Image (spheres, rainbow, N blue to C red):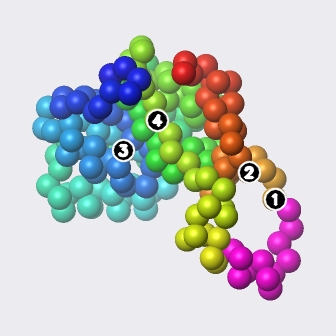
Amino acid sequence: MKHGSRLAKGSSILVAETGEPALTIASIVGPTGSVVYTDPVEGMVETTQAEAARRGLTNIHFTQCSADELPFADRTFDAAVGRLSAMFFVDPVKGVREALRVIAEDRIVSFVVWGPNEAIPFFSAVTDVIDQFVDVPPQDLDAPETFRFAAPGKLIRVLENAGAKM
């Protein structure tokens, strides 16, 4: 699975995120493939496990763990996908290094993060109102939170520091 390739039937994929796209990826790779869903929050794992059972997916497995200490052998997966999860990694560089460690050589990792708050009406509509009435102290720009990687190039620097080839 080189850069830009699609998920293939029979692939083994590690997914760290909030339920989707793990369930969809399990459908794409089919019964000869496998997906391992990870999340540090027990309730997220349980909820996704219940939804997988409801959908009849038998090729998805569940592990409650932190991204910076993945309990998998080196080179276990064909790809690693993190949708809306990297911004909550305790140590983003360590989390990306772990993702790189568990994928086969020359395979792909993919992370999706939120852009700037003002570009996402779902968030900005709420925060704009709150900001009018609540004095919010400045936050640490590196703290685990939704818009941690909103600044252009910030996630790219994490990937580079972790040793990702782009």
Mark 4 or mark 2: name the one nearer the start of the chain: 4
Q: CA distance from mark 1 to mark 3?
A: 31 Å
| Image position, residue 82 (x, y; %) | 47, 42
Q: Quadrant of residue 91?
A: top right
Residue 52 lies left or right of residue 32; in this view the side is right
Q: Which residues are magenta?
A: 127-138
Could you tell me which quadrant the C terminus lies in? top right
Q: Residue furthest front?
A: 119
Is residue 128 highlighted in magenta?
A: yes
| Image position, residue 102 (x, y; %) | 44, 24
Secondary-structure class at tag 2: loop
3 vs 2, front mark: 2
Q: CA distance from mark 2 to mark 1?
A: 8 Å
- The circle on residue 143 is 2
4 vs 1, front mark: 4
4 vs 3, front mark: 4
Q: Amino acid at mark 1?
A: Gln
Label 2 neighbour load within 10 Å: few <14, some 14-19, many 20+ = some
Q: Amino acid at mark 3?
A: Tyr
Q: CA distance from mark 4 to mark 2?
A: 21 Å
- The circle on residue 139 is 1
| Image position, residue 94 (x, y; %) | 63, 31
